[in-house]
Amino acid sequence: MAGKLITVEGGEGAGKTTQLAFMRDYLERAGHRVVLTREPGGTALGEEIRALLLGHRHDGMAPATETLLIFAARAEHLERIIRPALAAGHWVLCDRFTDATYAYQGGGRGLPPERIAVLENWVQSDLRPDLTLLFDLPVAVGLARAGRRGAADRFEREEWAFFERVRAAYRERAGRNPDRYRIVAADRPVAAVRAEVETLLAAWLERV
Ligand SMILES: Nc1ncnc2c1ncn2[C@@H]1O[C@H](COP(=O)(O)OP(=O)(O)OP(=O)(O)O)[C@@H](O)[C@H]1O
Ligand SMILES: [Mg+2]
């Protein structure tokens, strides 16, 4: 039986990585084999590409270059990790995926979504997440959380309006695909967010 692909999205400091650890535990308790991974990255080559994307060696990288690097990492991730895991019946939990490309490179950098869609179709064929949780919160709250963690990466150094565009793009996509997305208000204590995530995973598990 094929597994499921669940992706977690949202801006910096939304709590994605924190909640993914709880989600893994929850799904394992429900009897699933879980593979927890992230983008950009998830493979040795993908993590090298991640370092190029997040580091400061290439600070004025063109949006098209950035997008192609992300999809190069994604192609490797799909080929080596995601597709084999799904074929083996495992559940894949991914910390950011293609919705992030629409939000950051589309909304944030202004790349036309049709161009991203060309790469999405090419690299993924018909593979799309089965479920996407969008952790939504005010930009100020997320940046304050992320800022406590240390040095800013290449995205975290962007201007305020960039993050507002990212948030708006995420919300707009989620609003258009209510079957696939669940929007979680992430501006609440960790335990409250966790409880809501587990409630909606339970409801979703009933359906699949
Ligand atoms: N609900 C919450 N309330 C307060 N602080 C939180 C909450 N969730 C996570 N944090 C803290 O905020 C910081 C960022 O959380 P986390 O790394 O999970 O976010 P993220 O969405 O993965 O961020 P990034 O996009 O930068 O990877 C961490 O220090 C974490 O402990
Ligand atoms: Mg994270």
Image (spheres, grey):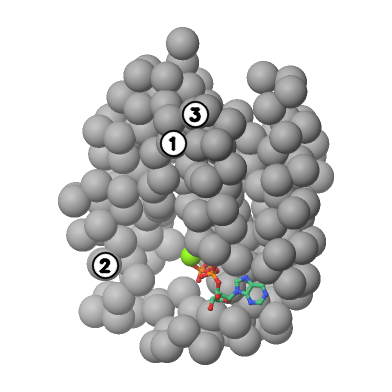
Identify residue for label 3.
32
For residue 99, the mark is none
Front label number (1 vs 2): 1
Mark 1 sits on what residue?
A: 34
In three-dimensional space, the C-alpha distance between marks 3 and 2, rounded to whole angstroms, equals 31 Å
Q: Residue 37: percent from the left, percent from the top?
A: 39, 47
Mark 3 CB within 8 Å of ligand 1: no
Q: Amino acid at mark 2?
A: Ala
Classify 10 Å Cα crowding around label 3: few (below 14), some (14-19), many (20 and above).
Answer: some
Work out whether 120 lies above or below 152.
Answer: above
Q: Quadrant of the C terminus?
A: top right
Residue in the picture at 74% in, 20% down: 207
Residue positioned 48% across, 22% down in the render: 3
Mark 2 or mark 3, which is nearer the start of the sequence?
A: 3
Q: Amino acid at mark 1?
A: Val
- The CB of the residue at mark 2 lies under 8 Å from ligand 1: no
Q: Nearer the viewer, residue 205 or 11?
A: 205
Q: Would residue 56 be found to the left or right of residue 123 on screen?
A: left
Answer with the quarter of the image where residue 77 lies. Answer: top left
**Does residue 99 appear left or right of residue 140 in this picture?**
left
Helix, strand or loop under label 2: helix
Question: As displayed, is residue 152 above or below residue 45?
Answer: below
